[in-house]
Image (cartoon, rainbow, N blue to C red):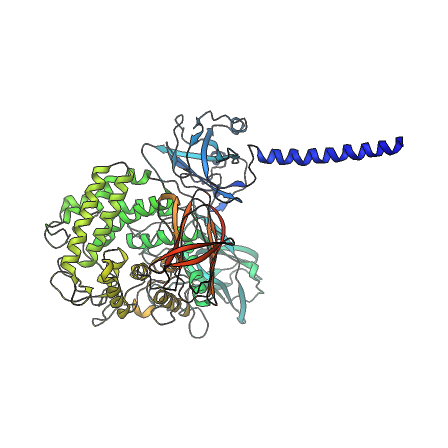
Amino acid sequence: MHISNDKTTLFQKQSIFILYLIFSCLSLAASPADRNDSCKFSALYVDLIAYSADQWQGGYLLSSNRTPFENHSQYPAILTRQPAFSWSLTTSSKAYRQKAYQILVADNRDALIQLQGNIWDSGKVPGQHSAGIPFEGKSLRPKQPYYWKVNVWNERGEKTASDVSVFYTGDLQDGYGTARYPLQRTDQHPQHLRKQTDGLYSADFGRAAFSQLRLSLSSAVDGDTIIIHLGEALDEKGRINKKPGGTIRYQAYHLGLKKGTHSYQLQIRSDKRNTGPQAVLMPTYIGEVLPFRYVELEGYTENLQKEQILRSMVHYPFDDEAAYFSSSNDTLNQIWALCKYSVKATTFAGLYVDGDRERIPYEADAYINQLCHYAVDNEYTLARYSHEYLIKHATWPTEWILQSVLMAYNDYLYTGDLRSVSHYYDDLKAKTLTLLEEPNGLISTRTGKQGPALMQAIHFNGDSIRDIVDWPHGGILGLGSQDPGESDGFVFTDFNTVVNAYYYKALADMGKLAYALGKADEGHFYAEKANKVYRAFQKYFFRKDRGNYQDGIGTDHASLHSNMFALAFNLVPEKYKAKVMEYVRSRGLACSVYGSQFLMDAIYRSEDADYGLSLLTSTAERSWYNMIREGSTMTMEAWGNKFKPNQDWNHVWGAVPANIIPRKLMGIEPTQPAWETFDIKPQLGDLAFAAIKVPTIKGPVSMEVKQLEGRFDMLVDVPANTRADIYIPVKTKRKKVSLWVDGRSQRLPVHNGWGKLVGVPSGKYHIWLSDEF
């Protein structure tokens, strides 16, 4: 009995102890703590730099515990005395909302470990802001390391702490300066190596890249000479094309070999045109590069392995995993891959340039490049720096001057950081070109209002600017005199429809920026000017009898461009949109790869998903697929060689699908700065399946959509600290439909073919509609 009681007592004690542990854990999990396992920091940014601790030497990433000042290395230097901090969070709980934050900055790591921000302690700040929060601490010193971390609290008072991060200041300047990464190298061996004949090897790297070449070669004697061929294109015999035409690259090098086995670094020759006074030059720590995919070694008689051929690709730091897209259409998948890679590969200069022929920044290239870069990587500094460079180095087309304002607004919308806009505000005001406005509310470059004052205000080093519409025009750059070029026969007049469509958009965006900066009077000024242009646009350009917009005052010619730009910039009244879109469809793809940005924006704004998909997946001569078919692995400057005989094969303004697929086909776009709110409005056409990951400053938006057997099925992941308006396409004429969200049914009102879930908070959701949508 006594033993039995002891056993019972021991069992009871063990049971009580186990229950105690369980309830203790439950109690601990339910109480506020410094560690909230349902929430983690996924990224920390200083001045939009995500990898602030990284260092490079000669383009190679270092692994070092020392500072860049000790290593004498390149690093992403913070240049402003008031940097801004941003972060993104991942959470496993639905509807996570940050309710407060605290930023700590110290001049040594130990202070932060003890939770002391001896340079700045923001205190516990209520709010959901997590982007573009300016530093307000003690004065920073140049060329010093600083350590920082963030604490955030959710609505239940649970605290999540970030790891400690470090950033390094550079030569600090008054005002604002954009931080940038150094260029980096990625070493690659060929994907394929083939011995063609004795003494001839051919190597294929799979894709072209702006690169240098290093070889490890052997020779039995001194003085053997081989020829090394580098090129972007092949001829009909499968050899490197030595006369590829246009600006498609080919170079040959004679290399003298030494006896034994040695490593040889090819010194890439510079090109006179793309190293001229206006070109962006390669930094000395990198050296000259050439875009090539193929290598041939002629006259080499020893055995050769892939490992002996090393291509060093030069590019801006790029996260290949930041974005993803796949669909049930293989052509579309190939085009996405082409365009995504093009964004990475064309960052070789550390500034957006127009390809390899000139290596000069242009606003039109940079605008498209900016949108594409945002869509494929969580990277904002290269877009911002390129835009700021162009503010001070304007180019000649009227519309491209105006695009500086559009880029400034995109920068703010995607980052939530207004410092660049504030710093360049007066320059941006000049870029609206209001000095060219006539009493009718429209602007013109032909009415005598251009002069030195305007040229100085817009930072253009020339006598005058002129309208472009699209490029190239007929009869130039290798096109015959009878070739119409890429402007669909556009008739240029004193008052140009396309120019004034841009003018309207620039005024509207400038008004939003002024309001955001607290300049309400100027915001009202620009909004009123935009309204005036809108009214004049309808009065002078729209033909009610034809249902389209003419090219300008004084002509009755209507082009694709005058109508697609009107639609893209929301200048078409609702009652006329269907008619204008009908005209746009009738013109086909009668524009350049540059113009296609605005054509695709127009098509998806008009919700013509089937037509949009048909152009994205077209295999005609004018198509993105034709670039692949002709042999390029980066997007071309034109649809194909015949459309611009002097074109290059590495022009990112041809990568339009990189932004159109996420922004329009999948419908994921910010509606408030820093993605505080955003839309998900998929327009898939007849795609049966599509999946995407879109990077944002708040973390990735992920989505999968299926359209099968009368059911619309969506999986979506909304990042923390954001809200999404999710649109569901409805193909029935009912005023309400039954929608299921995570297994719960709800009745959803239908408007213009869409059901809308408003303000969906962070979390993962399964949404489906099976009501014969």
Comparing 328 with 459, the one in front is: 328
Q: Quadrant of the C terminus?
A: bottom left
Measured from the top left, where is residue 64 in percent x and y?
54, 38
Image quarter for residue 253?
A: bottom left
Q: Quadrant of the N terminus?
A: top right
Number of on-image labels: 0
Q: Identify the residue shown where x is 69% and y is 34%.
A: 21
Residue 237 higher or lower than 69, as above or below:
below
Comparing 616 with 535, the one in front is: 535
Measured from the top left, where is residue 310 in percent x and y?
52, 57
Q: Identify the residue shown where x is 57% and y is 59%.
A: 307
Comparing 677 with 555, the one in front is: 677
Is residue 413 something one can see in this rendering? yes
Measured from the top left, where is residue 134 in percent x and y?
38, 33
Is residue 661 something one can see in this rendering? no
Comparing 717 with 185, the one in front is: 717
Left or right? Give the position of 565 relative to 46. Answer: left
Residue 733 higher or lower than 406, as above or below:
below
Residue 512 higher or lower than 689, as above or below:
above
Q: Identify the residue shown where x is 15% and y is 43%.
A: 453
Measured from the top left, where is residue 557 in percent x and y?
16, 67
